[in-house]
Image: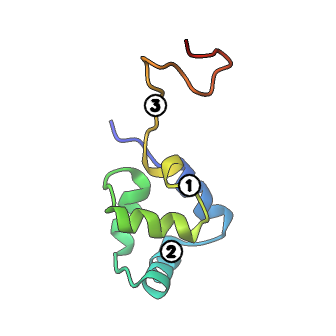
């Protein structure tokens, strides 16, 4: 099942940007050319951008790439680093 990138969509909307405007900013600020359709597929989780495109997108929104593009799971052997339990 495809996982929508709701954080990315939320960031774009909070900046009052259209998908077209994000594509224009990527071209102007990072010399990255993608189509509006491709950007829409990135938001929908249908396409995974290259690292350079992902970093450029997150830079536009001053966001952490891990929160948008990567599923960070705790190491089951070491435990959840965010929990209050200490590792032994």
- The residue carrying mark 1 is 64
Q: Is 22 placed above or below 4 here?
A: below
Between 36 and 83, the one nearer to me in the picture: 83
- Mark 1 element type: loop
In the rendered image, the vertical position of residue 69 relative to residue 50, given as above or below: above
Q: Residue at x 41, y 52 (%)?
A: 44
Q: Element type at marker 2?
A: helix
Cα–Cα gap, marks 2 and 1 = 17 Å
The part of the image, by quadrant, that contains residue 83 is: top right
Proximity of marks 1 and 3: CB atoms separated by less than 8 Å: no
User: Of the residues tagged 2 and 1, which is closer to the observer?
Assistant: 1
Residue neighbourhood size for the residue with mark 2, other residues' Cα within 10 Å, grouped as few (<14), some (14–19), many (≥20): some
The N terminus - image quarter: top left
Question: Residue at the top extreme?
Answer: 88
Determine the CA span between mark 2 and mark 3: 29 Å
Q: Which residue is mark 2?
A: 22
Residue 23, located in which quarter of the rendered image?
bottom left
Which mark is first along the chain, 3 or 2? 2
Please give the name of the residue rendered at 49% of the width and 71% of the height, measured from the top-left corner: 19
x and y, in percent, of residue 9 in the image: 54, 56
Who's the residue at 48% across and 67% down the image?
Answer: 57
Q: Of the residues under marks 1 and 3, which one precedes in the sequence?
A: 1
Percent position of residue 11, x then y: 61, 59
- Along the viewing direction, whichever of 84 and 3 lies nearer the viewer: 84
The residue that disc 3 covers is: 73
- For discs 2 and 3, the disc positioned in front in the rendered view: 3
């Amino acid at each position: 099942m495809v996982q929508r990138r709701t954080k990315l969509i939320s960031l774009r909307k909070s900046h009052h940007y259209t998908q077209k405007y994000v594509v224009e900013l990527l071209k102007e600020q990072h010399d990255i050319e993608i189509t509006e359709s491709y950007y829409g597929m990135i938001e929908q989780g249908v396409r995974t951008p290259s690292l350079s495109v992902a970093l450029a997108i997150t830079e536009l929104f001053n966001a952490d790439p891990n929160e948008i593009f990567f599923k960070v799971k705790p190491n089951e052997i070491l435990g959840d680093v965010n929990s209050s339990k200490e590792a032994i």
